[in-house]
Image (cartoon, rainbow, N blue to C red):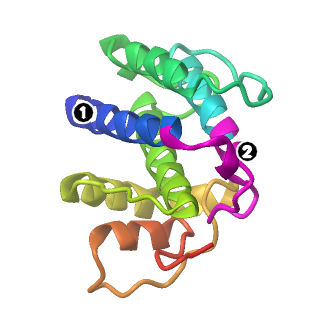
Amino acid sequence: MNETLTMLREAAARTSKLVTEIGEDELALPTPCADYDVKELINHLEWGATLFESLAQDGEFPPQKEYTGDFPERLERMLAVWARPESWEGVSQGMGLPKSVLANMALTDLVAHGWDLARATGRSYEVQEETATAMLAFARQMAPTGRERGAFGPEVQVPESAPVFDRLLGVIGRDPAWKP
């Protein structure tokens, strides 16, 4: 729990800061996540924070609402729930997966979409090596299910000599060299 929670907090802080820096003039920019422009991707992140908060409490899938601009507040609520030991116990009734898997899914969602937003807006997005390594192991394990459920795109071939974060991006279907 503690290592993943620490990584989740770091990713939340990094992604939240990035989102708050994005200007109105950047909301229509395309992102590496082809289904979303910047505004739609932030909206997806807002929903994701609410989703993972709900699932950690054995709740259901909340409906996705229109962009509200309250992503940092939603993240704080999500992190408060994941800070409780009981949030890590058992299997989520809403998704039928161990809650530790859901925490890693939340981490992957924050980091992947944080990178998407950074790439789309010309900002940097750094991830610690140990976080990238843990996420790569998780992504490799979850890739078949992630692709089946539409959470991951087709794998992008990235050389084994590439940085760990680039290899993670490739596994989840991102091209590390993507440019707008």
Q: Nearer the viewer, residue 107 or 71?
A: 71
Residue linked to disc 2? 40
Residue at 31% x, 84% y: name it. Answer: 160
The image position of residue 134, as x and y in percent, is 28, 54
Report, in whole angstroms, how far the alpha carbon at label 1 lies from the one at label 2: 27 Å
Identify the residue at horizontal 68%, vertical 48% (top origin). Answer: 25
Q: Quadrant of the N terminus?
A: top left
**Residue 95 seen by the camera:** no
- Give the extent of the magenta segment: 21-43
Find numbered disc 1 in the image and state the secondary structure of the residue it sits on: helix
Q: Quadrant of the C terminus?
A: bottom right
5 on left or right of 90: left
Frontmost of labels 1 and 2 is 2
Residue located beneath label 1 in the image: 6
Is residue 3 magenta-colored?
A: no
SS for callout 2: helix
Q: Amino acid at mark 2?
A: Glu
Q: Amino acid at mark 1?
A: Thr
Residue 4 is situated, as x and y percent measured from the top left of the image, at: 28, 36
Residue 30 visible to an observer of this rendering: yes
Is 107 rendered above or below residue 157? above
Instruction: Say above or below: 161 vs 50.
Output: below
